[in-house]
Image: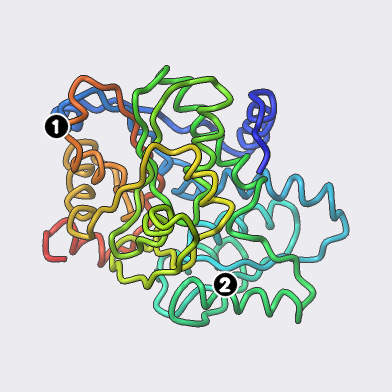
Amino acid sequence: MPRYTLDELRDAARSVQAAMTPTPAQRWPLLEAALGTEVWLKHENHTPLGAFKLRGGLVYFERLLRREPDIAGVICATRGNHGQSVAFAAARAGLRSVIVVPHGNSREKNAAMRALGAELIEHGEDFQAAREHAEGLATARGLHLVPSFHDDLVLGVASYALELFESAGPLDVVYVPIGLGSGICGTIAARDALGLATEIVGVVSAGAPAYARSLAAGRALPHPVSTQIADGMACRVPEPRALAIIGAGAARVVEVSDAEVAAAMRLLFETTHNVAEGAGAASTAAALQARDALAGRRIGLILSGGNIDRPLYTAVLAGSL
């Protein structure tokens, strides 16, 4: 993956901002009191789709149409936020979209993708199975397969990190949730282009620890997924290119349990009255783990999305999950 220049990142950010306004990087006094330090919360739950993925989709499709102007349609696999991004960007470009999700996927994310005009197909028991099915359908139907990890996706997603650093100034540490890796890779790209010394800490679910275990082993290792709350981080097979970037650019990767994520979701609601999906609250869960070590440091937390089904969120807020 290329090392992006600041001009390249800002050019991609302009493409993103043609379709959406920058999201807030906000300090919340009650959240800072809970964490015992200065905290900048990056509200990617405030994008038009409620998650950061839209940024990557906008840049990917802009560049795809330059390369393949006669393309007829696209297909991808998703647990929800990437699929919404593809459906939104495809509709904006006048293309049809097919989205493959695993059985049991979020009903509300599925409804959102259909509302954006996508044909939705359910297949398999997890993201990896849906991904493999989408690859077969792409060939059978003559559709362009939009990957879940790609240079152009990272370039678009980096715009949120650029906004964060330009709003908050240099930060000592930023916590970023990891699904397949575009978010943390974009944050590393923005940090490096700006010449900052910020530590970037990746966060995975203890119920989907493939990236943490792969980094420890020095090679990509699949790992079963068991998380019940952090579907945005439910990765069974890590992306080798993302793994290399994270290994070279992140300070470390930490694991958070479903119980810790649920507690962070409740904390974010109580202190900011913002809804965070499981992956969106993972950065806060990791900061709570490290609370004592963070005293006196300026930290950033990526609230990567707020797309969670009402019954699940109700159970989280009630403490019954």
Question: Whole-percent x and y of residue 165?
Answer: 46, 23
Instruction: Report which quarter residue 90 is drawn in.
Output: bottom right
Where is 42 relative to 133, above or below? Answer: above
Which residue is rendered at x = 62% and y = 65% of the image?
117
Q: Name above or below for residue 249 compared with residue 244.
A: above
Q: Residue at x 24, y 39 (%)?
A: 287
Whole-percent x and y of residue 168? 40, 20
As drawn, 284 above or below 195: below
> With 133 as the anchor, is 176 left or right in this view?
left
Amino acid type shown at disc 1: Asp
- Decide which of 195, 299 is in the foreground and name it: 195
The total of numbered circles placed on residues is 2
Residue sticking out furthest to the left:
319
Callout 2 amino acid: Arg
- Residue pointed to by mark 2: 131
Residue matched to label 1: 292
